Amino acid sequence: MNTLYLKSFIRCKRKAWLDFKGDKSYEVWSAHKAIDKVNQYQIFSKLCNGEIYTGLKACKKGYQGVIGLKIKGKFFQNVNAEIHPQLLLRTKGISKWGPYKYLPAVYKLGHKTTKEHLFDLAFSSILLESFEESKIEKGFVISSFDKKVNVEEIYLNKKLRKKVLNVLLNLNECLEGFMPEITQDRKKCTICSWQKFCDKEAKENEYLTDIDGIGSKTASLLKINGITNTQTLASYSEKQLGKKLSKFNDQKYEKASIFVKQAQAYISGEPYFISNKNDNDDLLEKTCSGFYIFDIESNPDDKHDFLYGFLKINNLFIKKEDLIYEPILNLKNNKGESYRQIIKILFSHKEWPVLHYGETEKIAIINIAKTLNFSFEEIDSLTSRFLDLHTYIRKSWILPLKNYGLKTVSNWLGFEWEQKNASGSKALYWWIQYQITENEIFLKKIIQYNKDDCLATLQILEYLIKNQLKKN
Ligand code: SF4
């Protein structure tokens, strides 16, 4: 039993069990975890003015911040426990080391203080008290907004300690038992290191939450109505299902039809064409005399778009090797120069549409245009050139996939990223590494990744156009 299992347990019981007993060869490296660690260290270091050291010696010397400690102890019915306090912060008081003591602190990403932070602090405080021979009445949640460090005090009262003891007891029971079921809330799985392992099992067991658009609530509703797996859903009458989906109001029949077809596609592996509207004809017409593909890499926590990538395509028949890719780096977030370059590219072919995948790029361009004091009409005319292929694909196809993200769709179409297991969060991890080391190799990796994102978007465009032509 340790802090890491407790954190996992709060998110997903199964994750705690897998962290403890799972076959580690199925676990995948998580960029999120790595980013968290780096951010954590940087913020803690700033908070302690750089006086941050590792291990027990650092406590004895009374340094401001101590990291990397593992403290063993026992709680409740003699269960062995181990805490890994993220940070111990020196404060006034008396402890076994002298006229000071340490209080636990945890790092928080985002605005919300959650159970995970509170329980982590409360668990730490229980073992820390006997370790330091001092009363631990409070802990801290540390976060950073707009590059400023925020410190929130959390009083570790009896009620909170009692709660965490109950959770620890449940955790102990879970770790001793069989592997828990896959969580109903599959959104949690997207950043989990066991995702591949659980996805395989979910598919084999025909979990309803594998179907795009079906979350835990809809899955429960379907189960109440006797639809317990994807196979049953795929063979269900759309009309009958619509009657049962009253929670979707006017959209109930439309939703039912999509769910059934999505389940059929998922099982058969065959895509299903749903639109006869001329959207994709329009796409062919709009792109035939040239277009750009645009993709951004950003650090959302710092609100910093650090790379804008443009792929220039004169026509669809041009060889991939002859395409011109132009990356615009915005290393210091001093927007002027990069904005000027973006506008220069966009206006070098005023008639060309700009293709992108997802909403981010269009929102970014609106903000850039506003910053540059474009008039309402100018912004309107610029954004009307932006075509979101994610919307196009969703409107016209039901694909045999779990989701419609760029990676999932283009991988299905056979596209391969040059760098293995690349992802948006890995690109962010490289960016953070670049900021720390200033090693250009990380920038090269980010640029290659962004270029591949643009090429993957191009592959989706080709699919849309080619298949539309076949349907006509
Ligand atoms: S992938 Fe999902 S179900 Fe599996 S351990 Fe992670 S969060 Fe839990």
Image: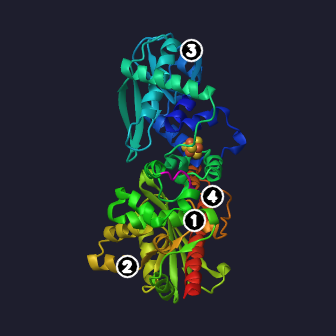
Q: Earlier in the sequence, mark 2 or mark 4?
A: 2
Q: Is residue 354 magenta?
A: no
**What residue is pinned by disc 4?**
422
Magenta stretch: give its range: 226-230
**What residue is pinned by disc 3?**
74
Which residue occupies 40% across, 46% down?
Answer: 147
> In the image, is 367 to the left or to the right of 390?
left
Task: Give the secondary structure at mark 3.
Answer: strand
Task: Give the secondary structure at mark 2.
Answer: loop
| Numbered marks: total | 4
Amino acid of disc 2: Ser
Amino acid of disc 1: Gln
Q: Does the residue tagged 2 have its C-beta within 8 Å of any atom of ligand 1?
A: no
Image coordinates of residue 244 in percent, x first then y, are 40, 57
**What residue is pinned by disc 1?**
264
> In the image, is 241 to the left or to the right of 381?
right
**What residue is pinned by disc 2?**
384
Give the vertical position of 9 relative to 160 (above or below): below
> In the image, is 204 to the left or to the right of 100?
right
Amino acid of disc 3: Lys
In the picture, the quarter occupied by the C terminus is bottom right
